[in-house]
Image: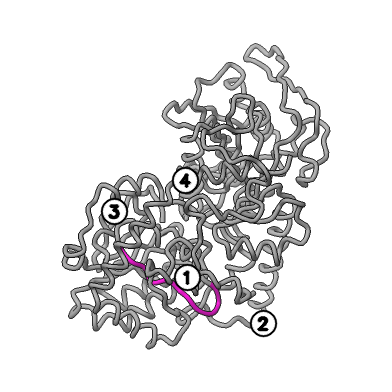
Amino acid sequence: MPLVRAGNLGGVGGDMRPELDERAQHGTSFAAHSGEGVGEEAGNGAERREDGEGEGGDGVLRVVLVSLEYRAGTFSGNGVYAQSLVRSLMALGHRVMVVSAAPPPCAPAPSGTSPCSSAPIVLRLRHQPSQSDGSAEGRGVEVVHEPSQGEECVAEVPVDAWGRLDWRCCWQQWATRLAGEQGGAQVAARVARFAPQWMLVVDWSAVAAYHAIAGAPVWGGGKGTDGRGSSDGGGASSKCADQQGHEHPVQQPPGRPRMAYLNFRVYSLSQYQAGGQGGEKEKGGAEEEEAERERAFYREKESEAVAMADVVTALSTRDARYLASSLGAGRKVGGQPRALLPPLREDIRVLAVGREVATSSWRASRTYVTCCVRLSPEKNAALLPALLRLLAPHLPALGVTPLVCTGTSATRGAFGEAVLAEVVSAAPAAVVVDGFMGAERMAHVYSQTLLNIHPCLYDAYGMTVVEAAAFAAPSIIHVGPGGAVGAAELLLPGEQLALPLDLSAALPVVVEGILALLQDRQYLAQVGVAARRRSLEWSEEASARVLSAILRGGPA
């Protein structure tokens, strides 16, 4: 088994009602990639501007992104997409601050304490720290000057557990630290001084962190953080101390900022779309009870987020409809969830544009059948070794080698390690890329990919499908019972921009379909080249303009 180690940066982004899958299955055109179709209330009567004018007095939007995963220790598409959002908003001239969690510090913890109980919250500032910033050090905050970063400030909160986004992740510790006096109060004060119009809250896991910040005393007496009284009216003032202990008044914005819920994945739905052939086994007894508790947990958290938000976005029309129909009973007037497809990362786009793709050379130069997903149950990763076991005997004659991107050992967990071992057993000749691929490595892999297999039965989006398409690598995506892949709204199977296959069918049927595709390189080339054109159209700038229009049109 050839082992390739990738760089440590870069990225991979109850049964659903049948009508939610209609667009993906029938190839209905979705116009969001051109800045349209973002929801029935997009704009909400506000004029859409193309000149970067925002809500602030200087014509610039001021937003705070609250995301458990961001730049520190990125391990999934959530962190990659969060960085893309921030980068694209700043490119339009908007001002952005970020509050995120961060991996545990490397230094050993004092005896009897958790690794992060005493680790300082890190404030990474674009501007040179002021005296009042410096005085925060020693009170649970470490201030770092990073002039190369474009964000106004990135507040990173170290937590004990890392590498997961489910209900066992670090969401509670992150929020508790932000609510505490040792560092958390300084973060809230900095957010208040930044005077944002919006706080963009990524997934249910960031809602408690949002409450910790928006409920801090620095905002003054208000109406709470349920989102229904986010505009308190009137100003509030606080004081900060310099290094000499002298207090200086700081005028706060007139009330708390509005809250936008950015849903990157519907957990109450997607957690139970894993499986298929080779997927999770049927649960019973205690396991089923645990699964029910988890499902109820997600429904409660996601329903709360939808109800309290002024604006709700999802990564596909299907997910937006599900949020509205199944989780949106208490949502605000004007809070209709709307779709915003994630764009192709700009660094990937630049590399892809710089590479010529000719159909003739495409057919001769590509050798990999590739799979790049996180090796986890919700990605239906157990399907991969089951497929490879039946495909492997046929691949040498076709001149094809399996290539599997596995993430890092720290993020694979026991399930991922077991899947990886089965992959190696099923296809000893497979190339295994260990670690998350950076842009250059991704370009190299996908430029040699004949066929990309995306095993998920449900995926909120599936950014690796779009990244592969940028280098003219066509992808098999699930179209059938049990869910769909959000990227199918950009790369429409009905327009031959992706390769639809029912991955929940019997394994021999799925393998037969894959082999038929591998034997038709001309067709794979045609689909790949067409998918490349579409993927390059939907850029970070185009997506950021749509998000800006949504925020401008949010309720006053």
Q: Which residue is mark 3?
A: 443
Which residue position is annotated with label 1? 27
Q: Which of the numbered marks, if any, corresponds to residue 542?
A: 4
Whether residue 103 is visible here, answered yes or no, is no
Specify which label sits upstream in the sequence, 4 or 2.
Answer: 2
Q: CA distance from mark 1 to mark 2?
A: 40 Å
Mark closer to the chain start, 4 or 1: 1
What whole-number distance in Å separates the C-alpha atoms at marks 4 and 2? Answer: 49 Å
Residue at the spot of label 2: 285
Residue 247's place in the image compared with 368, above or below, is above
- Mark 4 and 3 residues: CB-CB less than 8 Å, in contact? no
Residues 122 and 223: in front is 223
* Residue 464 left/right relative to 424: right
| Cα gap from disc 4 to disc 1, whole angstroms | 22 Å
Q: Residue at x 75, y 55 (%)?
A: 331
Task: State the image coordinates of residue 3 (x, y, percent, origin top left).
Answer: 26, 62
Q: Are marks 1 and 3 in contact (CB under 8 Å)?
A: no
**In this rendering, would 254 be left or right of 436?**
right
Left or right: 176, with 426 as reference point: right
Kindly identify the residue that appears in the image at 52 percent across and 28 percent down. 125
CA–CA distance between discs 4 and 3? Answer: 22 Å
Q: Classify mark 1: helix, strand or loop.
A: loop
Q: Quadrant of residue 474?
A: bottom left
Q: Nearer the viewer, mark 1 or mark 3?
A: 1
User: Residue 444 at what x, y percent from top left?
Assistant: 25, 55
Comparing 139 with 301, the one in front is 301
Amino acid type of the residue tagged 3 in the rendering:
Ala
Q: Amino acid at mark 4?
A: Ala
Q: Describe the element under mark 4 as helix, strand or loop.
A: helix
Other-residue count near label 3 (Cα within 10 Å), few / some / many at <14 / 14–19 / ≥20: many
Q: Which residues are magenta?
A: 473-483
